[in-house]
Amino acid sequence: MCNLYNISKGPQAILDFTRAMRSAAGNLAPGSIYPNYPAPVVRVGEDGERELAMLQWGMPSPPAYVKGADRGVTNIRNVGSPHWRRWLGVSSRCVVAATSFAEPSPAKDENGRTPNVWFAIDESRPLFFFAGIWTRWHGVRKVKDGPGDFELFGFLTTTPNAVVAPVHPKAMPVILTTAGEIETWLSEPWEEAKALQRPLADDLLTVVPKPETLDAV
């Protein structure tokens, strides 16, 4: 399960790649994203135009798994579930900007800690996107804060490719690397868009050093 990723590109690079028309993301300093943190995503706005917005990572959990506060679901695999099917239409899809992502190493380090293994398209860490979904939600994220209104996102996962599998054999994020894939995810019917829930080609992903900037965005 991917519960940590990094973004080192600014809002203009995201706008250009996705052909979004406006940004509400501010300056967007580089840093890492953790569950329940705000992060830059591109979605289709109410007026039909693409917009860059800051949403909180973690979709609403299935009610059967919630007792008290709902910390949210970051990764979604079973899109056939009735809980997730409601958000598979174009109006609920988004793309999540990233330049690298982490999975816990299967081996502990010399201090007995579990380090992260980081993955990117290549050593230069170009921009890519996770295939995501989003929703508006009213509920309790933290008990001490009480109920509130949130805009939440999560992203799809799939079978890991040969690069990720030795580290995390169960799943990897669904990654989009071309303008055409982003166009399909943000604008095409689910019957076409669902084909993007597949592993990234092995030669399009590599292991990279830990990002220099790990402060949360």
Image: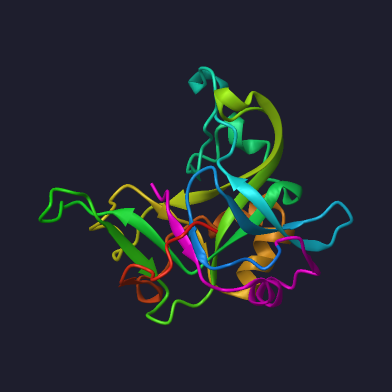
Query: Is 3 part of what is drawn in magenta?
Result: yes
Q: Which quarter of the figure has residue 44?
A: bottom right
Foreground residue, 87 or 68?
Answer: 68
Asked if residue 109 lies left or right of residue 176, the reply is: left
The image position of residue 215, as x and y in percent, is: 46, 60
Which of 98/129 is in front? 98
Which residue is at the front of the view, 11 or 216? 216
Would residue 191 be seen by someone viewing this image from the given angle? yes
Measuring from the top left, give residue 167's x and y in whole percent.
25, 56
Q: Position of residue 15 (x, y in %)?
A: 71, 72
Q: Residue furthest left?
A: 110
Does residue 63 show up magenta in the picture?
A: no
**Residue found at x 68% / y 51%:** 93
Residue placed at 69% from the left, 76% from the top? Answer: 12
Residue 110, quarter of the rendered image: bottom left
Q: Taking 17 as reference, is 78 above or below it?
A: above
Q: Which residues are magenta?
A: 1-25
Question: Visible in this render: residue 138?
Answer: no
Residue at position x 86%, y 58% in the image: 48
Quadrant showing the C terminus? bottom right
Say above or below: 161 vs 37.
below
Identify the coloring: rainbow
Q: Is residue 129 above or below residue 124?
A: above
Q: Left or right: 64 with respect to 181?
A: left
The residue at the far right in this view is 47
How many numbered discs sit on the rendered protein?
0
Image location of residue 5, percent across then percent down? 45, 58
**Left or right placement of residue 73 versus residue 23 in this view:** left
Quadrant of residue 100 within the rendered picture: bottom left
